[in-house]
Amino acid sequence: MDTSRATADVVIVADHPDKVSRAPSDVLRVVVGVIALLIVVLIGLLFGDGVVAFTADLLRGLDQLPSWLMTGIGVLAQVAILGLIVLAIVEAVTARSGRQMLAAVVAVVVGASLATLLSTLIDDHASQVTQLTEVGLAGKGGAGPAALLGGLTALIAAVSPWTTRRWRRLGWLGICCVAVTLFVTAPVAFGTVVGVLAGWVVGSATVVIFGAPSLRPTGADIAAGLEAVGVPLARLEQVSLDARGSTPYFAETTSGQKLFVKALGEDERSADLMFRMYRWVQRNDLGDERPFSTLRRAVEHEALVSLVARDLGVRTPHLVAVSPAGPGGFALAYEAVKGRSLDRVDPAEFTDRLLDGVWAHLVVLREHRVAHRDLRLANVFLADDGALWMIDFGFSEVTASDLLLATDLAELIASSSVMVGSDRAVAAAVRAVGAQATRTALDRLRLPLLSGATRTAMKADPELLPAVRAAVSSPQAGGPGSAQQ
């Protein structure tokens, strides 16, 4: 798509995205690589001789293969190595990026050095299985194969973010082929595994230090995508709002319609996956489903739940369009609502009528087993005309379990108690869903199970959460509350 033509008449007011960024997934790769490398090194130090001998016995049948065949495999490995080096150099030169070229050089040197050091440390003994004429590093023992693999793997890991998916796959396929060939033809040792892991760690760390291409959709990408689905814009302005996992914008179409636009790219998806992984490793049962396989599926799910909630009678902004936004990104455009989120409303404005209006939306969702799953005050909007709107169904679930429905109760009770106190917050819940249903939230009223914003607000008053729990567990489940009609 010709983005410049599609967006030529659009006024775009947005932060200029950095050409390079550091995604959470980059840090995650380093952490996982370091853990795997430490495990292999510890196994090598503690049980190295036994593991090498056992592996050599498993591969003993390879010594019956003709030496010319094994030598040929070694030659193919050298060709693959040369091809990988040429590929990486071509990609670095083509990019014309001094940062990328420096990152590649640093990755090769440090990756090879680290692999050599660790291989020398744990590979005191190696067991020769196959007999072949030495070709380059194939067939040699020592730290040579480890250094080679460490440097190559670090090189591919460092330049991968700057290449296309096809070239990335080709590069990693080449690494696998070289690793398997050296493992079979060289003396059995830890060098191959250590080389790959050390290179992976160093290459991934290089990406974190030097950065990778930013994957956040630009304003021009968003405008072009909306234009492609029949929503031409006249203005697009980035805003600073609480929008977890997305970049928010206000927009105006050429016909004058006001929109709220959420832009999501691979960077946001990486952050969301890490957030979900953090929730998964906790001891508490948060009821999370498996993450969606792609960003497209996650965006489609949010659009689906938003449409379902609106059809059920929940007042939520109309979904105008779902569109692509640059390579790998997407945008969700909703009708804009003029007003304030409840976390920005003065506590004096929180009448019981306002609380009951919020709970009325939750009652509709509960009746149809839809869990919002992020019912903090920032996701409930008070329009200028006094109407209440529920927004952001990005983390929601349909056909929700009792656990998720109870978590919604707990989140809304806890977040509203910050504004109105424990008794009034619980009393509003009892009026909406009854005392028995309210008490199902008791086990979920714990700080680790609440949203980050609610936890932060409640920590400012250490007595608030115990008071909320006491009000929920009381026979009257909160008592009559204080009426402020």
Image (cartoon, rainbow, N blue to C red):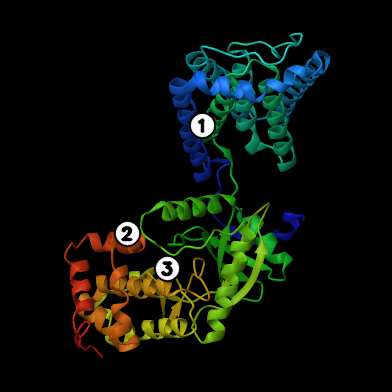
Q: CA distance from mark 1 to mark 3?
A: 33 Å
**Which comes sooner in the sequence, label 3 or label 2?**
3
The location of residue 474, given as percent across then percent down, is: 18, 80
Q: Quadrant of the N terminus?
A: bottom right
**Which comes sooner in the sequence, label 1 or label 3?**
1
**Disc 2 packing (10 Å; few <14; some 14–19; many ≥20):** some
Is 204 rendered above or below residue 56? Answer: below
Of helix, strand and loop, which one carries label 1? helix
Is 336 rendered above or below residue 284? Answer: below
The location of residue 260, given as percent across then percent down, is: 54, 69
Q: Is residue 198 left or right of residue 137?
A: left
Quick check: can you spot residue 158? yes
- Determine whether label 2 and label 1 are within 8 Å by CB: no
Q: Residue at x 57, y 19 (%)?
A: 53
What residue sits right under mark 1 in the picture? 205
What residue sits right under mark 2 in the picture? 448
Q: CA distance from mark 3 to mark 2?
A: 14 Å
Q: Residue at x 70, y 12 (%)?
A: 139
Q: Amino acid at mark 3?
A: Asp
What residue sits right under mark 3 in the picture? 374
Q: Amino acid at mark 1?
A: Ala
Q: Would you identify the image quadrant in which residue 227 lies?
A: bottom right
Quick check: can you spot residue 106? no
Q: Nearer the viewer, mark 3 or mark 2?
A: 2
Of helix, strand and loop, which one carries label 2? helix
The location of residue 339, given as percent across then percent down, is: 42, 76
Return the residue nearer the eye: 203 or 70.
Answer: 70
Q: Amino acid at mark 2?
A: Pro
Of helix, strand and loop, which one carries label 3? loop
